[in-house]
Structures are given as C-alpha cells and as structure tokens.
Amino acid sequence: AQTVTQSQPEMSVQEAETVTLSCTYDTSESDYYLFWYKQPPSRQMILVIRQEAYKQQNATENRFSVNFQKAAKSFSLKISDSQLGDAAMYFCAYRRGLLDDKIIFGKGTRLHILP
Amino acid sequence: DTGVSQDPRHKITKRGQNVTFRCDPISEHNRLYWYRQTLGQGPEFLTYFQNEAQLEKSRLLSDRFSAERPKGSFSTLEIQRTEQGDSAMYLCASSPQIHTEAFFGQGTRLTVV
C-alpha cells in the first residue's frame, strides 16, 4: 500500500527566510502524482503545487518549489521569502495515476512564521 | 462558481443519534470525495464517487456510515448511531474528470457528546 511520511510535525522560520518541508513516500508505481496542500487555521485546504512523476523538471509556483527525487521517493517543498500568510499546516499527498482517484495524505507539518 | 460547499459547518450531537452532512461540489466536477480529519492528522480517505456511482469505500467506513450521490451532483454522508470516536472534521472534495488535483470544501466539524 502507498504511504506518505512527513517526519517534521512542526517547523518555524523567520519571516523573509527560506524553509524546506520534507516528505517521503512509498510506492511501487511508476506513474503517479504528488501534491503539497496548505491548510490555514480554520480554513479550507488549498493546493500549493503538484508534480507529475514522469516529469524530471521540478515544479515551481512563485515562491514555492519542490525537490522531486524519484529514485529516493522524496518530495520536499521549499518556501522562499516566507510571509506571515504562509503559516499553516502543510500536507504532502500522493495519487496513483489518473485511474486510481484516492489521494493519500501525510500527517502534516505545522509551519510557524516568526515576525 | 463559489467552490465546494459543505453544510452544516458545525454539528454537535449526542451519542447514538444519526447525523447527515451535505456536500455540493464545483459544477460539472464528476468526481466527489469524502475524507475524515482528526486533530493533528492528515485527511483519511473514506469514499469517492464518479458521477452517481460509488467507486471505492475505505475500510474506515463502517456499516454505520453511508454516502450517496443520487443524481451525480450533491452528495450526503450519513452516520448512524454516532460514537464519540466519530468526532472529527469531515471534508468533501471534488475534481473534474481530467484533472489530477482535488478541490476541498471547508469541512463539517462533528462533535459527539
């Protein structure tokens, strides 16, 4: 069974600094998708960034980028120029191709931004 | 389009009572998902629909839980004979046929007393 592991329950970063959140996953599939979702306090979950496993190039979205290491089954999220609004729970998630629609989530990392 | 809508936002019920939650997905999204999230944990998959067909149910979904999506639009999740362990946030999400990410609602927080 596929699993997603986030080994950092909480992290803190100074405003304007860079922080990296770690995620590893376990799968025997070659075709899959990886996501980072953000869940601010008392607000809904929103997609931050996604990565298709067949793409070697790491995905970027403005201040958010990933380091996708397929052989190591590692998918970390880097947040540059951290802002107070980045404070939230961040969930790493996995989805096996397009035919299997179940998205599996890690337990999350709570990110604190220090002013 | 206002996104995925869930009702109610909060529900407090006594143990043993039945509760029903509603989810309205984004228009024309074929796939609809239910997840459960407890404090400090990631969302756990419960079930999902493609149009009106329920395609997969998690082992977490005991026989006290039932979900429907009668016309392929909104969905309901019913919990019968609620237990304290059912206290959680219940999240609904939807996605279009061809996309890979899911769009989430704000959730229904259930408290069983």
Image (cartoon, coloured by chain):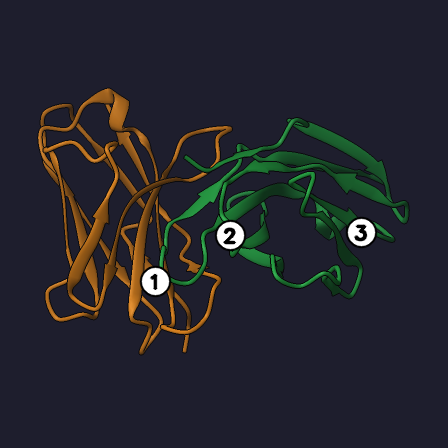
Chain colours: A green, B orange
Give how far apart the Cα atoms at labels 2 and 3 are.
18 Å
* Chain letter, disc 1 residue: B
Q: In this picture, is A85 found above or below B27?
A: above
The residue to which callout 1 is attached is: B5
The residue to which callout 2 is attached is: A45
Look at the numbered disc 3 and give the secondary structure of its residue. loop
Return the residue found at the far right. Answer: A17
| B80 on left or right of B95 | left
Residue A7: where, in percent of width, then height?
Answer: 65, 26
How many residues crowd around disc 1 within 10 Å: few (fewer than 14), some, or many (20 or more)? many
Task: Give the amino acid at mark 1.
Answer: Ser
Look at the numbered disc 2 and give the secondary structure of its residue. loop
Q: In terms of depth relative to the viewer, which is nearer, B54 or B111?
A: B54
Task: Give the amino acid at mark 3.
Answer: Gln
Residue B93: where, in percent of width, then height?
Answer: 37, 57
The residue to which callout 3 is attached is: A83
